[in-house]
Image (cartoon, grey):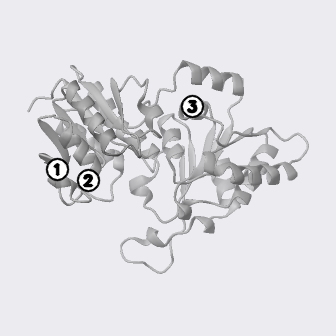
């Protein structure tokens, strides 16, 4: 079956999921006759696809817009005349958007891979494959199904001229260590005090440090900065606090110039991978094979996770705790990558 000239991708959020899902757009745009690609997204992740050459049209579905917002969205989608809608989120709401888009072909996962009965709303179903495989490879299966070559996340983010100019002026000729303090899920977080210890130690070794995070991370960043400043030694490199002070394009531009990313299992980690930045990632109760940096065993990547000594079924990572990772373990991994 030939690929229609206009394809709609539905992946509403979150940040890391949208970054990885952009690999499908990258694969389709590499075809000899690339399709026009539309994307349905929530407001938070909108900057990742807006003004991105991989996406031709962005459709925003604002949270809380209710039935009126949904009707306006579907009318907008139908006016575009998409020939294929792809639900990459496997939820009832994303599948409903794809189904109501007016596209004659609606592609999604099969029953084994779907949630909330979303498989009932799609017309064309893709076999699930290994459920523990990385999400990028799951999206790659969609690329293969549509006649494209699966690809990786490198280059899927395009920060834009303004964000690149901002980062260039901020950093001058330095390549900082970006320490991201946040994580949307509480079990994935690491104590702010330990981030401060890491920042102080790396700054003392001559590495400039940037603390990053979202609005919810302001307090943690302040705590980390205070501890790092108190522990600073003469000649230490600068530590800047940019938590809640960057847009997503600015963060992407910053990561593209960074020497290293240090953080937890969170969206900015996937942004770092997409921008070609080495990463040290602290994992708690999640499977890094599925949601870790892609590919998880690549040079320039260190995944830290403490699995229980006594087995917990076939998913021992469910019992892992991020806060069991020590400052020294993180520093050792960071120094290892910074010395390459």
Foreground residue, 128 or 247? 247
Give neighbour class at mark 3: few <14, some 14-19, many 20+ (Cα, 10 Å): many
Q: Position of residue 336 (x, y in %)?
A: 64, 48
Quarter of the figure that contains the N terminus: top left
Separation of marks 1 and 2 at Cα, in angstroms: 8 Å
Residue 151 as seen in the image, left or right of residue 278: left
Whole-percent x, y for residue 321 in the image: 55, 68
* Residue 190 showing in the rendered view: yes
Residues marked 1 and 2 touching at CB (< 8 Å): yes
The residue singled out by tag 2 in the image is: 92
The residue singled out by tag 1 in the image is: 121
Q: Report the mark closest to the observer, 3 or 1.
A: 1
Secondary structure state at the residue bearing disc 3: helix
- The CA distance from mark 2 to mark 3 is 35 Å
Q: Is residue 329 above or below residue 280?
A: below
What residue is rendered at 47% in x and 26% in y? 158
Between 99 and 110, which is closer to the camera in this rendering? Answer: 99
Q: Residue 202 placed where, x, y %? A: 75, 46
Residue in the image at 55% along x and 18% along y: 161
Q: Residue furthest front?
A: 68
When asked about the image quadrant of residue 172, the answer is: top right
The mark found on residue 229 in the picture is none
**Residue topped by disc 3:** 256
Label 1 near label 3: C-beta < 8 Å? no
Of the image marks 2 and 3, the number of the one nearer the N terminus: 2
Q: Secondary structure at mark 2?
A: helix
- Looking at marks 1 and 2 on the same chain, the residue that comes earlier in the sequence is marked by 2
Q: Earlier in the sequence, mark 3 or mark 1?
A: 1
Look at the numbered disc 1 and give the secondary structure of its residue: loop
Foreground tag (2 vs 3)? 2
């Amino acid at each position: 079956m030939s690929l229609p000239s206009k394809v709609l991708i539905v992946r509403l959020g979150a940040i890391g999921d949208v970054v990885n899902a952009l690999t499908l757009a990258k694969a389709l745009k590499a075809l000899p006759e690339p399709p026009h690609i539309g994307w349905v997204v929530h407001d938070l992740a909108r900057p990742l696809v807006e003004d991105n050459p991989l996406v031709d049209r962005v459709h925003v579905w604002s949270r809380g817009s209710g039935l009126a917002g949904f009707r306006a969205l579907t009318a907008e989608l139908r006016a575009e005349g998409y020939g294929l809608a792809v639900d990459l989120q496997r939820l009832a709401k994303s599948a409903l958007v794809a189904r109501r888009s007016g596209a004659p072909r609606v592609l999604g996962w099969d029953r084994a891979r779907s949630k909330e009965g979303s498989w009932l709303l799609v017309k064309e179903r893709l076999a699930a494959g290994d459920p523990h495989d990385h999400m990028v490879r799951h999206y790659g299966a969609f690329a293969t199904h549509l006649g494209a070559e699966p690809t990786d996340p490198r280059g899927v983010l395009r920060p834009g001229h303004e964000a690149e100019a901002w980062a260039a002026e901020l950093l001058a000729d330095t390549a900082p260590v970006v320490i991201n303090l946040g994580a949307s899920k509480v079990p994935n977080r690491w104590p702010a005090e330990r981030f401060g210890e890491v920042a102080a130690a790396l700054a003392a070794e001559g590495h400039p440090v940037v603390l990053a995070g979202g609005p919810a991370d302001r307090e943690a960043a302040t705590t980390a900065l205070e501890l790092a400043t108190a522990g600073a030694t003469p000649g230490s490199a600068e530590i800047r606090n940019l938590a809640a002070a960057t847009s997503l394009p600015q963060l992407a531009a910053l990561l593209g110039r960074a020497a290293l990313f240090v953080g937890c299992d969170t969206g900015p980690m996937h942004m770092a991978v997409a921008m070609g930045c080495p990463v040290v990632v602290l994992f708690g109760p999640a499977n890094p094979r599925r949601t870790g940096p892609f590919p998880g065993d690549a040079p320039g990547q260190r995944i830290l996770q403490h699995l229980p000594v006594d087995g917990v079924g076939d998913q021992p990572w469910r019992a892992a705790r991020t806060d069991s990772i020590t400052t020294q373990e993180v520093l050792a991994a960071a120094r290892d990558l910074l010395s390459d």
